[in-house]
Amino acid sequence: MRLTIWRFLDGNRAHEKQSAALVSGLRESAGEPVDCHDIDAIGFFALVRHGLPAYLADLPCPDLIIGAGHRSHLAMLAARRRFGGQTVVIMRPSLPLRWFDFAVIPEHDRPPPLANVILSQGALTEPLPAGQMRPRRGLILLGGPSKHFAWDSDGVRATVSRLLQAPVQWVISDSRRTPEGTLEGIGDSSAEICHWQDCPPGWLVDQLAQAERIWVTGDSVSMLFEALQSEAQVGVIQLPSRRRANKVRAAVQRLLDQGVVTDNVADAEQALPSPRVPLGQQVTCARALLRRRRHVNN
């Protein structure tokens, strides 16, 4: 027996990382060989004019058709209609949920409690290499203003300055959204600063795997969940919310309440009892998908 997956790609790296994470979880959990075929999604008008690519008829028929991002939705449904299989949409789709066999949706998006909905704790992320943690190695990742959070450069600098007092070899990286001047004065410290445009491919994965402590600004919820794939202590640098009802803040608060992350800077100075177990949401969701699929197929 083999599990055959067709994974539709919409060209958005963030979307494709989530579907790759689910495939990784299925490979770990299926108990049988998994074959995954990556297929470029086509837009609505191309689908209407030309239909699905002819080469799909040469592939093994899919058991699961997986995709993330609006551009992949119609192609997934068309593939199911022609070749069979069950569709698995990642993130809340623009089309009705009942059109898909399964949907993996972050709980902070508050999807309806339907039988085909699988809740994930944050966005799915691929596993990191294990066993590479380096003692006293720290990583600070800075985001920027977003629709959910305002940016407080002074507050961020103050928190970072306090973190730098811990006996840790820190690496600091900004992002496309980080306002100019945020890192002013921090460059005089012993921390290594790597601007996002200077980071080579694979740099972030290596840094996450090696870090013993990782701190992320609260706007970067996807980066926070990537950090939780590591064995490191994970901390969040709080930012002011733009509104009273803030679903991203609520997701971060749940992690704080569960003790999965910390916002207490003093924790960065404490010795770690042992490596933290990675969150592994890709495995949790893959197991839920396989369990529900068996129930539906039986």
Image (cartoon, rainbow, N blue to C red):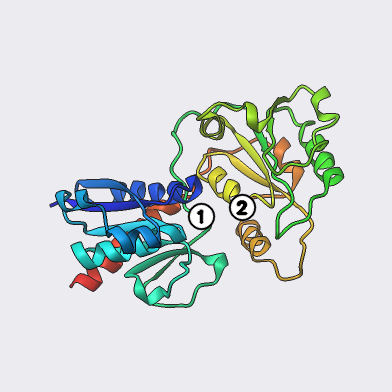
**Is residue 17 visible from the viewing direction of this image?**
yes
Circle 1 residue: 123
Front residue of this view, candidates 275 and 57: 57
In depth, the one of 152 and 67 nearer the eye is: 67
Residue 105 in the image: state x and y as whole percent. Answer: 47, 64
Task: Give the position of the C terminus as an image quadrant.
Answer: bottom left
Q: Between 103 and 289, which is closer to the camera in this rendering?
A: 103
Position of 114 with respect to 167 (left or right) is left
Where residue 286 appears, as percent x and y from the top left, is 35, 56
User: Residue 259 falls in which quadrant of the image?
Assistant: bottom right
Q: Amino acid at mark 2?
A: Val
Mark linked to residue 77: none
Q: In x, y percent, where is residue 120?
A: 47, 61
Dot 1: element: loop
Q: Secondary structure at mark 2?
A: helix
Can residue 285 be seen in the rendering of this structure? Answer: no
Tags 2 and 1 in contact by the CB under 8 Å rule?
yes
Residue 297 shown left or right of residue 42 in the figure: left
Mark 1, Cα crowd under 10 Å, few <14 / some 14-19 / many 20+, is: many
Left or right of 246: which side holds 123? left
Task: Give the amino acid at mark 1.
Answer: Ala
Residue at x 83%, y 44% (from the top left corner): 153
Residue under label 2, please give it.
Answer: 221
